[in-house]
Amino acid sequence: MLASLLLSVGIITLISVVLSLMMVVADATIGNYGIVNVTVNKETQFEVEGGQSLLKTLMSEGIFIPSACGGRGSCGLCKVTVLEGAGAYLPTELPWIDKEEQKQNIRLSCQVKVKNDIEIEIPEELFLVKEFSTTVESIKDLTYDIKEVRLKLHDPPEIEMKAGQFVQFEVPEYELTDEPVYRAYSMASVPSDTQHVELMIRLVPNGICTTYVHEHLKEGEQVTINGPYGDFFLRDTDRPIICIAGGSGMAPIKSILLDMAEKGSKRKARYFFGARTRKDLFYVEEMGALEERLHDYKFIPALSEPQEEDNWEGEVGLITDVVHRLTEDASGSEAYLCGSPGMIDACIAVLKDLGMPEEHIYFDKFS
Amino acid sequence: MSELLFPLAVFFASIFTSNILLTNYLGMCSFLAVSKELETSAGLGIAVTFVMAATTSLNWLVYEFVLVPFQLEYLRFIVFIIVIAAFVQLIEMVIERYSENLYFALGIFLPLITVNCAILGASLFMVIREYTFMTSFFFGLGSGLGWLLAIMAMAGIRQRLRTAKIPYGLEGAGIALIIAGFMAMAFMGFNGMISIQ
């Protein structure tokens, strides 16, 4: 009985070993594409080991292409222009690439394999995207459900970002996830403070990242982030700006306003901060104090459901109503909105009603 | 039937009378999923044919020369699966390396095939029916061709169906399964020609 059991285990092991040996040999000979050259934007060139996907190859060289699915070809985000060396389109790419993009040689970088010399083009700002190892310098309760996490960057030690952009926060394996996941958070810190990144993270019940930050993360711990990403930043015009954001949506707005103050901007600015009750408010003094530093700026916090004990004397009502009431003509202004999809859609409707052209409304939707 | 003719009889029988897809209903998942375009289903069908012919032969060798001498026939399920998986992986690497055209035509289907039950089914039938090496090879080849024939017929019909009016609720997999049933009945017409067991 025991002998036959051992024999069967032995035979299966033997067959598996023989087959794996064959695979190893094949991998080293057939699967070995040698050293190939990757040229990026006609100027940067590096030598890499062939055989990996373009996305992974670029990542190993420190170039991060935004991707949400981790290279499975199911999100369609990691698009890159490949000028030469990628071969024909794969059926796995076609669902994400339309005819117009095919003409421009846009490929899905997680599906393209680097097998020979390859020439690609990526937007310059992706060169700035890096992976940072950081430690948590402080965690502060802003409200009962929003925490401010301040990270000190170590390697690389500095980040080059625009006010309003976001980073991806890597959540390691823990109770709620058995693989690392990434979540995007706007940076609340000023770009001039290149060694730190501040994030405002609101607790979402059972949210993988928010639960991790609220219940597990401690000061002094290591955190990995990558970024910066995004096109939500202050446009270089003279138009007055209207910012609308509540809760943790304050993060990019705070960064933009502090940046304006540091640079001595003369633009007119209004910041509408919506909350339900007083306990949802935070940084009221800090944001109000900016009125001294900025040329023509007003901070307008508003409560939609002020409680008796709040003794609230400020604006009351839904933030959209408050904006509508306090803004006469928005046709010459531009708007920066940050918050939930519902709040943003409602704000866009109000702003358009106030005469603002849609192309001057910039927003960052939390999803 | 003479020794020489038997493999050929099995070959034709496995295409028509004992079509692995339409009489045993094996390999249904990829049959339903990939039979929307004639071209892709031809690619998948050819890949299945190739892998089936190769793995039945390989598995026959492993079975006869490793499992039978040690009286480990009951391990055939797991061993066959390992052999099929390794072979498919290997072939994919070879094709990807040496022929881009073939890779686009066949290579991308290979990972799909590892889990195609018709492939494992062919290897198991070969054991149950006690085929010789030659017969096993022709059985694998024929079963693959039979699968190719069935999926291409299906794809042809489904391409026509696109412009047809289909009752609500039967669209997609519903009507495809009904058609597969009709096709199976049509193939039963071949039954009297040759029979194998």
Image (cartoon, coloured by chain):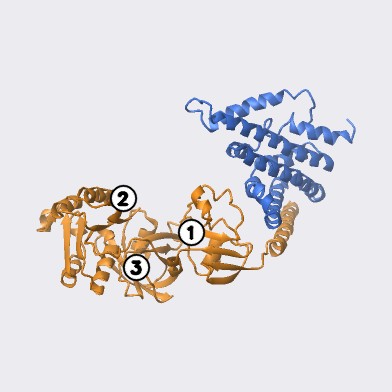
Q: Give the number of the disc on residue A179.
A: 1
Rendered residue at 79%/30% (across/down) = B196
- Report the chain holding disc 3: A
Check chain identity for marks 2 and 3: say if they share one.
yes
Instruction: Say what secondary structure mark 3 lies in.
Output: loop
- Chain painted in orange in the figure: A
Q: Amino acid at mark 3?
A: Lys
The CA span between labels 2 and 3 is: 23 Å
Give the mark, 1 or 3, whose residue is nearer the N terminus. Answer: 3
Q: Nearer the viewer, mark 1 or mark 3?
A: 3
Q: Position of residue A116 (x, y in %)?
A: 64, 63
Q: Amino acid at mark 1?
A: Glu
> In this rendering, would A238 be left or right of A366?
left
Residue occupying image coordinates x 51% and y 59%: A81
Which colour denotes chain B?
blue
N-terminal of the pair, mark 1 or mark 2, is 1
Name the residue tied to disc 2. A341
Whether residue B34 appears in this view of the structure is yes
The reply to whether the C-beta atoms of the residues labelled 1 and 3 are less than 8 Å apart is: no
Q: What chain does badge 1 belong to?
A: A
Q: Is residue A117 left or right of residue B62?
A: left
C-alpha distance separating marks 1 and 2: 28 Å
Of A186 and A202, the residue lying toward us: A186
- Whether A329 is drawn above or below A142: the answer is above
| Mark pair 1, 3: CA separation | 30 Å
Q: Quadrant of residue A10?
A: bottom right
In-front residue for pair A332/A280: A332
Which residue is the site of mark 3?
A162
Counting from the top left corner in percent of width and height, residue A142 is at 25, 64
> Callout 2, which amino acid?
Pro
A193 lies left or right of A38? left
